[in-house]
Amino acid sequence: MLSVVDVSVTYPNGVAALKATNATFARGQFIVLLGKSGAGKSTLLRSLNGLVRPTRGDVRNEAHGSIFASGATLRAHRRRTGMIFQQHHLIGRLTALENVLTGRLASHGFLRSLAPLPRADRIMALEALDRVGLADRALDRADELSGGQQQRVGIARAMAQRPEIVLADEPVASLDPATAVKVLEDLHRICREDGITAIVSLHQVELARQFGDRIFGLARGQIVFEDGPEAVGGIALDQIYQTHPAELAVAAE
Ligand SMILES: Nc1ncnc2c1ncn2[C@@H]1O[C@H](COP(=O)(O)OP(=O)(O)OP(=O)(O)O)[C@@H](O)[C@H]1O
């Protein structure tokens, strides 16, 4: 279980990106964050692994209580939390396998991580690539892969970390609709199989309905909706997107 307790985030430029937000993310669920651009989804995700430090309030996990209790607590929380980004953040000139191996670095001390990683890590990384159907591309450079394949490498890198929680910030926003579904299917299946809690921001309402166990809607830095996917209908979308019917039709596509 992971929760934010009364979390506010005000950036140094004065933008209040999250306002006294409370939310509990149940263990093992696939949770989707919906909201307009600027609603605060990325800020919430980044607070959940301490990349953004709340101005007020706390982030708690069941293992440690406050993730900010000490430097060691924050590091332990980050080790158990994998991140997946919209633009993959892969190193193009490295192979798919080498990129996935960077997911193993956090499990080793700094000095150890400067030397080649042990065989066991390479096997774990290969297994992670295999689970996203890319074992045969392990030795190809990341920048030679398609967008969908690159995002699968991003998923494999997060999984090689053996996380308990995965935070994914618009992981399919730059993919075509058919590829987006396939990539989310992979992410969803692996999280189910491994009992991983996934918190995923998406722009596509249909994908949220298809994959989410629980949907959180954000608007102007606040959670304005929380319910199951079946409840994501007209009124809920209006609350989340605060839009006119014509815009809702576009959001629902
Ligand atoms: N590092 C930052 N410094 C200052 N303001 C920021 C920073 N990051 C985000 N913001 C602002 O905080 C608000 C929330 O942004 P955030 O990125 O969390 O929203 P979002 O819902 O993820 O949007 P998008 O869907 O466009 O990624 C916005 O007004 C944004 O401009």
Image: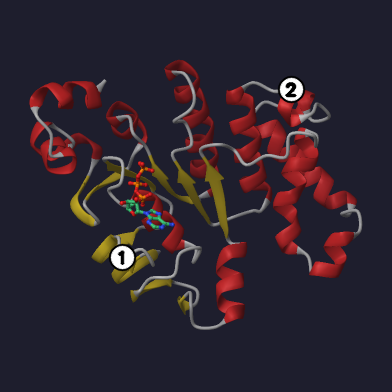
30 vs 90, left or right, is: left
Q: Which amino acid type corresponds to the residue marked 2 in the rendered image?
A: Glu
The residue beneath circle 1 is 14
Give SS at disc 1: loop
> Does any atom of ligand 1 lie closer than 8 Å to the CB of label 2?
no
* Cβ atoms at labels 1 and 2 below 8 Å apart: no
Q: In which quarter of the image is the N terminus?
A: bottom left
Q: Name the residue under label 2.
A: 144
Q: Residue at x 79, y 69 (%)?
A: 109
The vertical placement of 199 against 62, above or below, is above
| Dot 1 alpha-carbon crowd within 10 angstroms: few under 14, some 14 to 19, many 20 or more | few
Q: Position of residue 155 (x, y in %)?
A: 60, 39
The answer to which image quadrant residue 136 occupies is top right
Position of 218 relative to 12 (above/below): above
In the rendered structure, the answer to whether residue 52 lies left or right of residue 250 reads right
Q: Which amino acid type is shown beneath numbered disc 1?
A: Gly
The circle drawn on residue 188 is: none
Residue 209 in the image, given as x and y percentages of width and height: 28, 32
Q: How crowded is mark 2: few (under 14 residues within 10 Å), some or many (20 or more)?
A: some
